[in-house]
Amino acid sequence: MTKQFILIDHDGGVDDYLATMLLMTMEHVEILGVIVTPADCYAKPAVSATRKILDLMGGSHIPVAESMVRGINPFPYLYRRDSFVVDHLPILNERDTISTPLVAEPGEDFMVQVLRQASEPVTLMVTGPLTNVAFALDKAPEIEAKIAKIVWMGGALNVPGNVEQNWEPGQDGSAEWNAYWDPLAVARVWQSGIEIIMCSLDITNTVPVTSAFVQKIGRQRKYPISDLAGQCYALVIPQDYYAWDVLATAYLGNPDAYKLREWETEIITSGVSQGNTKVVSGGRKIYGMDEVDKSWFYSYLLEQWRR
């Protein structure tokens, strides 16, 4: 079976680790590397937790790179501190050493390197901001031809954003955080000809992480990966939490479970709506995940993490 080349770029939120864990269970993909962007996390613990997860799941051959890019609008520190908690979960600290390699190159340079060296086009699975992709396109425009597509958890098309005004006074609430962190990067990627498949808040709002679902994971805790997934979700269950990055990543497991819809869009890069992925006639065409078989989705997670 020919495997699909994947480079994952995540930003260290709880759901980013879970998305990485889900991707690791897919036998039809070959993960060329993991880039950690310091957006919804603090970089050092997020890199450490990522490497420990790869160790746990038999992925110690997969290189990890720490990105040095910085966004325009930082995530709240209360979001970012979860990276310290995950890095200290007992199940990730049963070993004295970490085997998964941390490459010397910054993540943004590592992306260029991986794409240049890949023998086949690579799918970019981005569950954080698009800053590394924008950097790579600016530094090495020729690598655009090596990107098969970008699957991105980001944006809000026809629903309100999640940049709440109590966190970011002066904003109008239309932006989603991964876009808001660096709107200029999103706009740069929109200038490319790369196929973009968005997993926006429009669809992630339909897949909440409920107590009932977490309890189902808990009943599988004899399996290490289910145990880790349950511990991660338990950190966030008191708040409204959705399967943002996990839903986006599950698309790679079974695209047929999703319905895509084409939209014409533009990116607002300044002012009170910066980061808004606005639907406009004549704009840049992208595909949005429009519907998902929710019964399949939750069952798929339980089955994939039952190991």
Image (tube, rainbow, N blue to C red):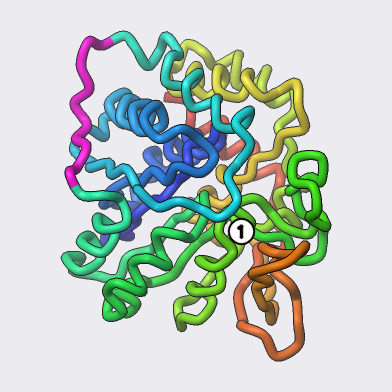
Q: Quadrant of the N terminus?
A: bottom left
Q: Tell me the residue that label 1 is attached to.
A: 179
Residue 50 lies in the magenta stretch = no
Tell me which corner region of the image, top left, top right, bottom left or bottom right, holds residue 190: bottom right
Q: Is residue 35 visible?
A: yes
162 lies above or below 148: above
The residue segment tinted magenta is 95-104
Q: Position of residue 112 (x, y in %)?
A: 26, 64
| Residue 258 x, y percent position in the rendering | 64, 60
Dot 1 crowding, Cα within 10 Å, few <14, some 14–19, many 20+: many
Comparing 127 with 129, the one in front is 129
Chief secondary structure of the magenta portion: loop
For the view shown, which residue lies furthest in the bottom direction? Answer: 282
Type of amino acid under label 1: Ala
Which residue: 66% across, 60% down? 155
Left or right of 275, for residue 22: left
Q: Residue at x 22, y 10 (%)?
A: 96
Q: Nearer the viewer, residue 86 or 303?
A: 86
* Quarter of the figure that contains the C terminus: top left
Q: Tell me which residue sits at (42%, 9%) in the image.
A: 90
Residue placed most toward the observer, 213 or 15:
15
Percent coordinates x, y for residue 144 in the rendering: 34, 77
Q: Is 99 a magenta residue?
A: yes
Residue 260 at least partly seen: no
State which quadrant residue 232 falls in. top right
Question: Image point 64% across, 40% down: which residue?
Answer: 243
- Tell me residue 292's x, y (percent): 69, 55
Dot 1 lies on which element?
A: helix
Q: Is residue 56 above or below residue 205?
A: above
- Report the side of 223 relative to 77 (left or right): left
